[in-house]
Image (spheres, rainbow, N blue to C red):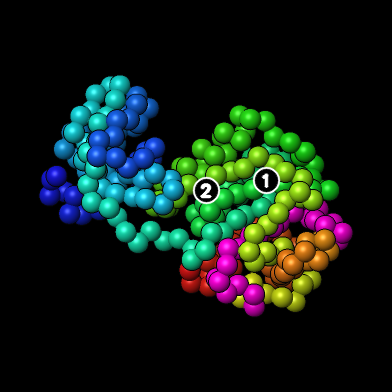
């Protein structure tokens, strides 16, 4: 390995697994050329499941890149327990914005929901693929070693949240800091345009969820999950 590996390089690549030798296809090879990298240059590689390491480019041409594995990189910033974001289906490209921000703010997975007031009832396979690609790019940009999967929509009634569950509810007197202690996984739930119905919130609360406030103002459906995650991130984890 070269001396460059004594410093953390800027560029990061997603790989299937961290192995002694990693071969990447034409897409990543072209990306490395665009970045003006060459054989002998150092990069960071991560597997999307929490492992990250240094690597050196040993071969690079138009159709493939070959990397050799270097030292592991420790200390990736993740929450003490997994954080699930459950968000109602939204119109247009709003889900892409939510997925991007949720990834940057530490989500371990993103579950799409079908709720009573959702204008959108389903999404196609290609849209789900695009949302997962957004999560991968956001993880790379924010220097996370975990890429949160974006899961296909399920009806809210069938969703089974794990650990401490928070549901955004205007008018609640409970703050995020009142209930988040990080002694278990955390799930946050937000609704569509028009919000969750009272019956949906009541069912969640009866099941053990905490209805929490996001402040005195009514937030847009794409803003609420980001505000809730931001409140959690502000606790210092």
In the rendered structure, which segment of residues is drawn in magenta? 178-200
- Which residue is drawn at the image coordinates 41% and 61% (left, top)? 77
Q: Is residue 228 left or right of residue 16?
A: right
Q: Quadrant of residue 197?
A: bottom right
Instruction: Say the numbered circle drawn on residue 148.
Output: 2
| Residue 230 counted in the magenta span | no
Element carrying mark 2 = loop
x, y percent for residue 45: 32, 44
- Using the image, determine if residue 65 lies above or below residue 171: above
| Residue 190 counted in the magenta span | yes
Q: Quadrant of residue 85?
A: bottom right
Q: Quadrant of residue 68?
A: top left
x, y percent for residue 25: 34, 26
Residue extending farthest right: 199
Element carrying mark 1 = strand
**Residue wearing tag 1:** 112
């Amino acid at each position: 390995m070269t001396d460059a590996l004594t410093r953390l390089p800027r560029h990061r690549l997603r790989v299937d697994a961290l192995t002694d030798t990693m071969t990447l296809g034409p897409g990543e090879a072209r990306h490395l050329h665009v970045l003006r990298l060459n054989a002998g240059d150092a990069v960071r590689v991560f597997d999307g499941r929490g492992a990250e390491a240094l690597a050196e480019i040993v071969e690079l041409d138009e159709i493939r890149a070959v990397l050799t594995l270097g030292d592991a990189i420790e200390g990736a910033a993740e929450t003490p327990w997994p954080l699930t974001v459950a968000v109602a289906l939204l119109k247009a490209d709003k889900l892409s914005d939510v997925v991007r921000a949720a990834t940057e703010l530490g989500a371990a997975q993103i579950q799409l929901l079908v709720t009573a007031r959702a204008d959108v009832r389903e999404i196609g396979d290609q849209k789900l693929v695009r949302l997962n690609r957004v999560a991968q790019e956001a993880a790379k940009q924010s220097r996370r070693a975990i890429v949160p999967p974006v899961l296909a929509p399920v009806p809210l009634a069938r969703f089974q949240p794990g650990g401490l569950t928070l549901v955004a509810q205007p008018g609640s007197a409970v703050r995020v800091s009142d209930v988040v202690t990080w002694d278990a996984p955390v799930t946050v739930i937000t609704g569509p345009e028009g919000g969750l119905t009272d019956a949906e919130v009541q069912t969640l609360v009866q099941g053990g969820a905490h209805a929490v406030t996001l402040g005195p103002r009514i937030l847009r459906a794409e803003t609420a999950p980001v505000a809730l995650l931001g409140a959690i991130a502000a606790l210092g984890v």
